[in-house]
Image (cartoon, rainbow, N blue to C red):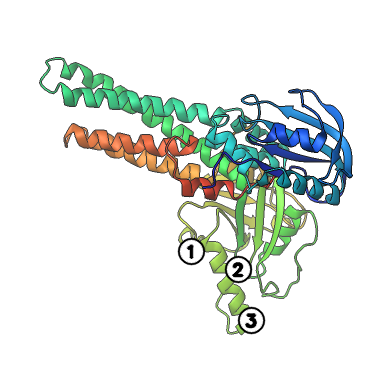
Amino acid sequence: MPSTSDTIVAIATPPGRGGIGVVRVSGSRVRAIANALCGIEPEPRRAQLTGFTGMDGVAIDRGLALLFAAPHSFTGEDVLELHAHGSPVVLDALVRRACELGARPARAGEFSERAFLNGKLDLSQAEAVADLIAARSEAQARAALRSLEGEFSRRADALANLIVRLRVEIEAAIDFSEDASESASKPAIEQLFEDATCDLQALLDAARRGARLTDGMHAVIVGEPNVGKSSLLNALAGNDRAIVTDVPGTTRDVLRESIVLDGVEFTLADTAGLRESADVVEGEGIRRARAELARADLVLRVADRASSVADADLFDGTPPAAKRIVIANKIDLDGAPPSRSERDGIIFIALSALTGEGLDLLRAALREAALGGERGGEFSARTRHVLALERAAASLQSARAALATVTPELVAEDLLAAQRALGEIVGTFTSEDLLGAIFSTFCIGK
């Protein structure tokens, strides 16, 4: 990882022309760069109107210079912001001039990375910065802001502290195994295990909802030919995205459309009708449909209301963790009312994609599948957070199961593994490779 002692520079505003563009500089040479480029001794947190000059003394532009002195800045270092006219030519010239004066171009996410390394943000908060910038809905923005303000971090830290208390109790039992008071600590240890297990499960459920809110859900529409899959896609998307005919096998390839429901983004994939076919092109479409099904987060199994499909046949090839919704379409043909029921974790909805009756029930079910019925209070999360919490849960379960059957030393090792997994969320235990992978996904000026 490159040295954080370097002074870095980047354009912080989006590419293209605009009324104002911002160039950001961070590091030990900020004041010297400000003096040479702007001809001023900048005062912290005071916007100063000044000219920006090149090496030959020719003016580059005129704008505002704003200094944030260390440690009271985003990165924890001296940070200079140059607010110029938003011409790409002008902004590039300012970056080149800063590099002539000792800065270097910043890597993607390097400003946020320095904020993390300098203790201004923990790792989940730094990731929330990128999530907030990338938010595509108000719900995503609110969730990212909650993570940026530390909601996720506080809950992860509280859980880690609870596991530390467990480790203290277990390691005390190791050190004082012959003490008469050892048995008195067993109820306390059991209660700590129970509290940690409940808190970890609650945090894992919330993180899964947060990840779905951040990343969206991959929803695959499957079923036999002519049951109304394409009509359902069009109804949910609000336009005629897919071709609809009475001819079986009209859909030959996977057709994708993104929709946002209550702040959650769904990528709907309309697939070829599942059946045996001798047609080479249709057969390829069916193969792609099954491949799409195998990586679904949510499966919408559409059936003609008049048909009868055995439960065992409904979701063949569906990932075990995928949410499942069965849609009995075409209720308009017999005048049946829209309805919803649930059995064995599968939601059943009767609707008409043609008339729109029952679509409100489906939209509510989609949101419930994404967020578990929660309304407000979600924080943004990522897949890596969910995986870390799952590892922590597995280690905690292993420690609890081993408590009565193996030596306390092995229990303490499992608890340490759980603590380390939680530490990966906020960056307490993090490899340089992981940091590089995370921050490389950020935009250059952040």
Residue 388, numbered label: none
**Kind of residue at disc 3:** Val
Q: Secondary structure at mark 1?
A: loop
Task: Of the two numbered discs 2 and 1 on the same chain, state the one appearing first in sequence.
Answer: 2
Tell me: residue 417, above or below residue 183.
Answer: below
Q: Can you identify the residue that label 2 sits on?
A: 224
Measured as percent of width and height from the top left, residue 430 is found at 44, 41
How many C-alpha atoms fall within 10 Å of the one at disc 1: few (<14), some, or many (≥20)?
A: some
Q: Secondary structure at mark 2?
A: loop
Q: Quadrant of residue 178?
A: top left
Q: Nearer the viewer, residue 343 or 40?
A: 40
Separation of residues labelled 3 and 1 (CA atoms): 21 Å
Separation of residues labelled 2 and 1 (CA atoms): 14 Å
Task: Of the two numbered discs 3 and 1 on the same chain, state the one appearing first in sequence.
Answer: 3
Q: Nearer the viewer, residue 211 or 194?
A: 211
Q: Nearer the viewer, residue 174 or 376?
A: 174
Count of residue discs: 3
Measuring 46% from the left and 32% from the top, which residue is drawn there? 202
**258 sits to left or right of 422:** right
Q: Can you identify the residue that label 1 sits on?
A: 317
Measured as percent of width and height from the top left, residue 438 is found at 55, 47
Q: Can you identify the residue that label 3 sits on?
A: 281
Measuring 64% from the left and 42% from the top, which residue is drawn there? 130
| Eye-nearest disc, 3 or 2 | 3
